[in-house]
Image (cartoon, rainbow, N blue to C red):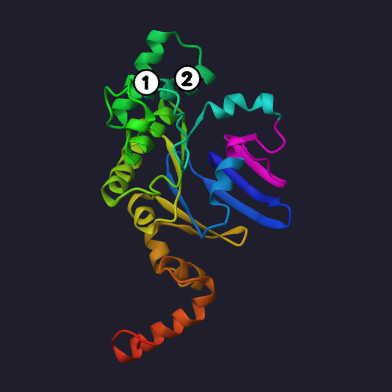
Amino acid sequence: MALIEFRHVRKSFGDKVVYSDLTLDVHRGELLTIIGGSGQGKSVMLKLLTGLLEADGGSIRFDGMELVGLPERARGPVRRRIGMLFQGSALFDSLTVRENVAYGLREHLRLDERQIDARVAEALVAVGLPGIESMWPSDLSGGMRKRVGLARAIAYRPEVLLYDEPTTGLDPINTTRINQLIVHLKRSLDVTSVVVTHDMQSAFGISDRIAMIHEGRVIFEGSPEALRRSSDPRVRAFIEGAAPDDEAELAALHGRASATHGPPPLR
């Protein structure tokens, strides 16, 4: 049995259908990356799992527990097993780094101040930022803010880590640092990891398995190598950066290039 199971999940916002039939498994201990174009519902999937959004239908099970329709008061035990790095880090500017990292500990666990300090220090060491407890979010670079957000997510030792566009807005050096950190934490903490990204270089570099969402459902799931070999024009267009409307033109250009053994003619 998978740790997380989405079965025939439906979700709409008014007339906008995000999911018509989302079916996907997340296996215990794996690093699964979710890809897809803007507006395809990648971040919505994470919010459905954490209860920030409610599905319109279907089933979402976490370690055998049905989450669809679960009362809010019953979600606490599930949320304590899941940590999330939000796209914008979601740090509180009015709180120090220590207070930001400790926020989830105070919300979910009964710890004294000594225990909280130890957990905060441990989490900051894990993300490579020891000793910055007294700094403020405004003092941090974009990459540091991401890592502090990640320290907050791991401080209460979750079983699952969710990453919502973890490298968006970062320079190549910090993108590499965050990707290495995602892989390191997966191994060192033995956590199940789900990464939402549009960065294909990151997806190919860190993933055990990749799933692609298109028009309300999963159209591909498999290894990074299988994704590279996919002949599905929707997958090829996404990987190669073509707009969906350009898929036919993309195929034609490839045909011309193969025929002439060179690049397609400029127009």
Indicate left or right for 70 with 132 as reference: right
What amino acid type is highlighted by mark number 1?
Answer: Val
Q: Is residue 230 above or below residue 188?
A: below
Residue at image position (66%, 36%) is 67
Q: Residue lying at the far bottom in this picture: please name it.
A: 260
What amino acid type is highlighted by mark number 2?
Answer: Leu
Specify few, some or many for label 1: CA neighbours under 10 Å numbering under 14, 14-19, or 20 or more. Answer: many
Indicate left or right for 141 with 198 as reference: left
CB atoms at circles 2 and 1 under 8 Å apart?
yes
Q: CA distance from mark 2 to mark 1?
A: 9 Å
Residue 214: x and y in percent read: 57, 62
Residue 193: x and y in percent read: 44, 41
Is residue 190 within the magenta segment? Answer: no
In the rendered structure, which segment of residues is drawn in magenta?
49-70
Location of mark 2 (residue):
105
Q: Is residue 32 above or below residue 105?
A: below
Q: Is residue 20 above or below residue 237?
A: above
Of the image marks 2 and 1, the number of the one nearer the N terminus: 2
SS class, disc 2: helix
| Closer-to-camera residue (96/203) | 96
Residue at image position (72%, 36%) is 69
| Closer-to-camera residue (152/58) | 152
Location of mark 1 (residue):
120
Residue 215: quarter of image: bottom right
In this rendering, does residue 177 appear at all? yes
Residue 74: x and y in percent read: 66, 25
Which quadrant: the C terminus?
bottom left
Residue 60: quarter of image: top right
Is residue 63 within the magenta segment? Answer: yes
| Closer-to-camera residue (140/239) | 140
In this rendering, does residue 20 appear at all? no
| Closer-to-camera residue (108/90) | 90
